[in-house]
Image: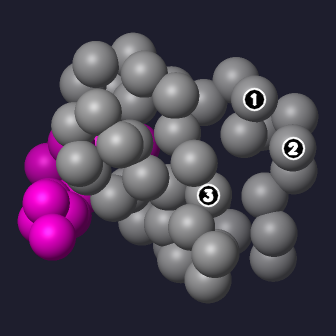
Amino acid sequence: MALSQELLDILVCPKCKGELRLLADDAGLLCETCRLRFPIRDGIPVMLVDEADKISEE
């Protein structure tokens, strides 16, 4: 299940309040500022910093 564009437009990173980008595989939302990937489970974004994966700078 894809997230609607309306939902993507209002979601922000809970850590820095920055913009999020939907990953190509629809498996998460990326905050490029914090380098955090927030998972999407059962079509619902999990917007908890403790649940986010840290993305390396590579």
* Residue that label 1 marks: 9
Residue 44 falls left or right of residue 55: right
How far apart in space, not on screen, are marks 2 and 1 (Cα)?
A: 6 Å
Residue 42 falls left or right of residue 52: right
Element assignment for label 2: helix
Q: Is residue 3 visible?
A: yes
Is residue 50 on the magenta stretch? Answer: yes
Is residue 43 shown above or below 36?
below
Element assignment for label 3: strand
Q: x%, y% of residue 33?
A: 29, 33
Image quarter for residue 10? top right
**Image marks 2 and 3: residues in contact by CB distance under 8 Å:** no
Q: x%, y% of residue 17?
A: 39, 16
Q: Amino acid at mark 2?
A: Gln
Q: Which residues are magenta?
A: 47-58
Along the line of sight, which residue is nearer the eye, 44 or 31?
31
Residue under the point 75% across and 29% down: 9
Q: Residues within 10 Å of mark 2 (few under 14, many from 20)?
A: few
How far apart in space, not on screen, are marks 2 and 3 (Cα)?
A: 10 Å
* Residue that label 2 marks: 5
Is residue 53 on the magenta stretch? Answer: yes
